[in-house]
Amino acid sequence: MFESLSQRLSTTIERLRGRARLTDANIREALREVRIALLEADVALPVVQALIQRIQVRAVGQEVLKSLSPGQTLVKVVRDELTAVMGSVNTDLNLAAAPPAIVLMAGLQGAGKTTTVAKLARFLKDRRKKKVMVVSADVYRPAAIEQLRTLAEQVDVLFHPSTSDEDPVAIARGALDAAKKNFADVLLVDTAGRLAINAQMMDEIKRLHAALNPIETLFVVDAMTGQDAANTAKAFAEALPLTGVVLTKTDGDARGGAALSVRYITGRPIKFIGVSEKPDGLDAFHPDRIAQRILGMGDVLSLVEQVEQNVDKEKAQKLAEKVMKGKRFDMNDMRDQLQQMVSMGGLASLMDKLPGVGNLPDAVKSKVNDKEVHRMIAIVNSMTKKERRHPDLLNGSRRARVAKGSGTQPADVNRLLKQYMQMEKMMSKMGAGGMKGLMRQMGAAMKGMGGGGMPPGGLMR
């Protein structure tokens, strides 16, 4: 998300960052570029106008012109105003109600509402330690109820059964009774979507809202619809007492206009964003972190959280103990590290949160992909158990067999083994000299790389 906007803004802001002095003229020129970038990102026109005006008021005032580093101060102003237009801070779900806290999900058909219900259930179960029940009141879409049943099993939460010949309000009331009997903390209610806003749809969801009196009513909207996402959310907000918005499919949205428009247009906070199709592909929406990513500053806090949530701590501890005892780092260990990288969303997801990556040439960024990681895992899987424990056994004929078994070329196997030897050498240094040994090794590696890039045979090809 935000790739095109980030590139345009980063280029514009970078030209001003090093200026010892800013003038009204070059600030106006920069703001014109910012305006074009926002419009190209499909940000709603009223939002663009308000944002530019707020930046201009601060930029041509004493705050920037009298600053010792005006270029950097202007960057801060743009970041602050981007953050403000998206809602300033993360607005958490309000679950302060007598159990079960009811969350009603609304939205158009095709926005990803049912999968979002399952993702939110997983989020509340894993991160908030809540006992969650889900129910589908969508009696119109074929297989909607069965889809939610399957997803509930995948994320391991309670599912209340329903049928397409029941009344949606009766389904919801039955689910509420079941949630109470099962001592559920939260009840998530999936509702029917339509291809467009219509009176029948609104009447039904109003009846559901009146019957349940939910503590949270979330509107689920596809981020890829851009300005339409904000306008649709506004129509729902006028008909329902929405408490927040969930933006889905943000991983497929290179523009980001919806994220910048929804909060301003609807007055409702964006609470979550869907970042992948995986069951854990839902993140809390942090406007300040998103603003930093738009300006190419990265999102280190989200990266740390992502690592903490996805790293298998038990495996990491065992590997650390193994290395510190001087035992050899083998191919099984390397495969574990690669698989954990995949579980964290892959290289692209990690790179997206690193500062400065937005300024890298497209040719470099395009080479950082998960195909190489999956290829490496396939190569290791094609080895025998003995070969994984003792990679030195891999002579020419064995390498050819591994390449054939993994659908790769012998050169790919050789490249993997070279990377393995570099990792094994680094791990052995750590075992021999503790952290100091590891830091010395890393320092030497950086010198060998000329202070940047990746080691020879790395994932950038």
Image: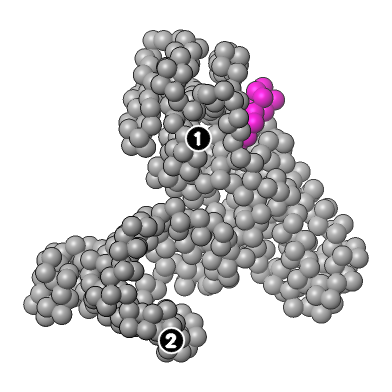
- In the picture, the quarter occupied by the C terminus is bottom left
Residue 192, numbered label: none
| Mark-to-mark CA distance, 2 and 1 | 51 Å
**Residue at 47% over, 72% down:** 363
Q: Mark 1: which secondary structure?
A: loop
Residue 425 in the image: above or below residue 221:
below
* Residue 238 magenta: yes
**Residue at 64% over, 60% down:** 292
* Residue closer to the observer: 157 or 135: 157
- Callout 2 amino acid: Arg
Upstream in sequence: badge 2 or badge 1: 1
* Residue 146 magenta: no
Give the colour scheme of this rendering. Answer: one colour
Could you say where residue 234 lies in the image, as x and y percent from the top left? 68, 31
Residue of label 1: 111
Residue 326 in the image: above or below residue 209:
below
Residue of label 2: 440
107 vs 73, left or right, is left
45 vs 245, left or right, is right
Residues drawn in magenta: 235-245
Residue 412 appearing in the image: no
Farthest residue, direction front? 325
* Residue closer to the observer: 383 or 257: 383
- Callout 1 amino acid: Ala
Could you say where residue 421 lies in the image, as x and y percent from the top left? 27, 80
Label 2 close to label 1 by CB (< 8 Å) = no
Residue 324 in the image: above or below residue 138:
below
Could you say where residue 272 lies in the image, as x and y percent from the top left? 56, 42
**Residue at 36% over, 56% down:** 312
- In the picture, the quarter occupied by the N terminus is bottom right
